[in-house]
Amino acid sequence: MRLLAFCLAMIGLFACNNEQKESRKLTDYVNTFVGTDGPGNTYPGAVMPFGMVQLSPDNGLPGWDRIAGYFWPDSTIAGFSHTHLSGTGAGDMYDLLLMPMNSKFTESLTPEGDYRPYSKFSHDQEEASPGYYKVELLSSGITAELTTTQRVGFHRYTFPKDSASKIILDLGYKLNWDHPYDTKIIVENDSTISGYRKSNGWARDQHVYFTAHFSRPFEKIELFEADEKSNKKEVVSPKTKFVATFASEEGEEVLVKVALSSASVDGAKKNLQAELSGWEFDATVAKADMEWEKLLGQIEIEGSEYQKELFYTNLYHIYLTPSLLSDIDGMHKGADGNYHKAEGFDRYDTFSLWDTYRAAHPLYTILCPDKVEDFIKSFLVHYDETGLLPVWSMAGNETNMMIGYHAVPVIVDAYFKGIEMDVEKAYQSCVESAKEKGRQIDEYMHLGYVPTDEEGENWSVSKTLEYAYDDWCIAQFAKALNKQEDYEYFLKRGENWKNLYDPKSTFFRPKDPKGNFVSPFVPKEYTNYYCESNAWQYFWYVPQDVPEFIKTVGEEKFSAKLDSMFTYYPSADDKLPIFSTGMIGQYAHGNEPSHHVAYLYNYIDQEEKTQEMVRRIINTQYTTKPDGYCGNEDCGQMSAWMVFSSMGLYPVNPANGVYDITSPWLDKAVLHLPNGKTFTITTENQGKNNHYIEKVLLNGKEYQQLTITHQQIMQGGELLFVLKSRK
């Protein structure tokens, strides 16, 4: 009987565990701490999909590892700021730092002489999920919880009993490249403050207006103006600070709602009224979770628990940027420094286009074409304001970071996929951006390549190759619009990659203004001629015409070189820059120029090598640990590669509406398309060694091609992969 009872109990426990596994929400699989260690540069805090607010803890110390404000190995928290960049190499944002304190605080970080109180914390007493963050501040015994709406950050602080509990808003707080030049705090009544923070940083002129509502009246307040205590109700200075002090009872909760706007305090107030008029913190957390659950549910997958955690964590990260810029009424700061109103659409910014045009934006066309429509409209108002498309725009500013005019492939890809836009304006913006006089585009147009510059970081080879790709995209746009003269002109420019190809070395090499190859030339060296890469990594960048590229090199040489790319490892004494990470031979998965390379075996009838290498990259370059990214996550691009590749797809040419095929890493993926249809990717015989394609069936019929079009996917259906082991 005891044995029977034990067996029944174990059966019940097993059934209960299975039921728990089955009932796990998709948001439960997301680990927001992935990327907070190593080179990932992500943040773990609360954010809504494409939200204006990124409410996250700041460790309070500067440095490359803390570009996103938070670094997993650290043990300090200096506060919770409302704006952050996800996965970049740019140390900017960190606006509106809020910090709860009490009489137990004794320690301070003192960068550049600033008083910066901080608390110790432990990861054992920290948790996060999409739209929610919680941490125990060990130095004070205060529990901090964060959540958000699109434009409002919501704080809940649970205090212990203390006669000198405080909440500080520090507008003078700065980190890394960010420097406030004008801040203002206004005490409006006994529970409301408002103001702004204007700063120079990587983005030269950022405006963040705010209103902050507290759930309890102020007992005692202090305002600081340039470190001096002020008796006024309004302070203006490059450094201002607000301190509310009160006696707290054990377990007392104080809530703070902070609404943002890039246009005005009035805009922030409208955003607060529209999105968070009440004080229901738990309901706001639940609403954020529900929104994330809905978005993640656009792709339902089957696989192991680990696969689900890795997949949904990466899917989560693609939705952190671009970031909402416009208020509920459309007002926002434009790239011309003036305030504008978005009519009939939401304006977005934080476009890391050198990274995201490669895979993140093509993925958006599948999952959220309505957002892509707003992205394109945002590009075009940026063009109205500046005369050019954005290069790397953020917070209503153009940073002009990185190279290319990569809003072009995003626009062209969207056009051919049927995304609504002002076609003539879109086309004109592409043409004018390709004829800009700056960024060596004028020299490129004159010579057919970007020449070397003896001084500085001119990235001449990379610029030539990327300009040529963008030109090819414009040619396709021109052809579709029956602009024959433009088509021929830009098609010829799209072949400018040939002007730097050296058949002797079989590499793209820098040329001086007279047309001479620069010597000495060592392909594996990292020089100023290649953008964050070397000649090996940029050799493969002709996505517009891979067959012609192979013909130019010679298929035998191309094949041998592709093999060498993954086997020719740096030597022990090679000096690798900070962005050369995720190395497999000379292949650097931690940086974007390499991302399409594994798929090029498909073009020389060696698709098994694509299948082998893509699987190897997934298994070795991504994990669910804090250091789970091998390089900067880069606003969704690193994650988009993973999401696409795990389903057996990737856009080698991200503007032609074609996805290259490899063997899926997942057992099954069901894409719930915005048009109401479903596209299902399934596998048979999936296993550790069974990742080679035996045959493919599309809607039950054998499918011989190694590509599939966007239109085929959007029609719905099933793509079945029968897998085998390699013999």
Image: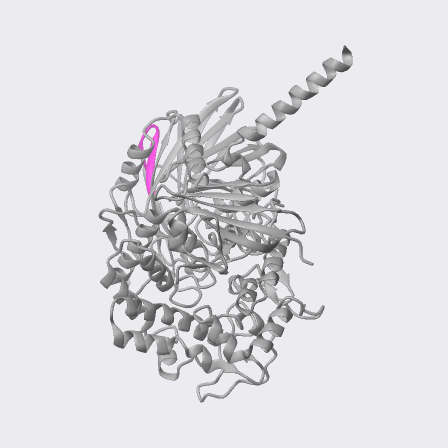
Residue at image point 35% right, 56% down:
205
Find residue 243 and report its horizontal and vertical position in percent: 43, 35
User: Which stretch is magenta?
Assistant: 185-195
Find residue 594 and report its horizontal and vertical position in percent: 54, 64
Residue at image point 65% right, 47% down:
687
- Quadrant for residue 22, please give it: top right
Position of residue 245 in the picture relative to residue 35 (left or right):
left
Is 402 within the magenta?
A: no
- Quadrant for residue 554, please give it: bottom right
Find residue 105 and report its horizontal and vertical position in percent: 56, 34
Residue at image point 41% right, 73% down:
468
Can residue 545 be seen in the rendering of this structure? Answer: yes
Is 192 within the magenta?
A: yes
Q: Nearer the viewer, residue 715 or 14?
A: 715
Quarter of the image with the C terminus in it: bottom right
Q: Residue furthest top?
A: 1
Quarter of the image with the N terminus in it: top right
Residue at image point 33% right, 75% down:
490
Q: Nearer the viewer, residue 35 or 258?
A: 35
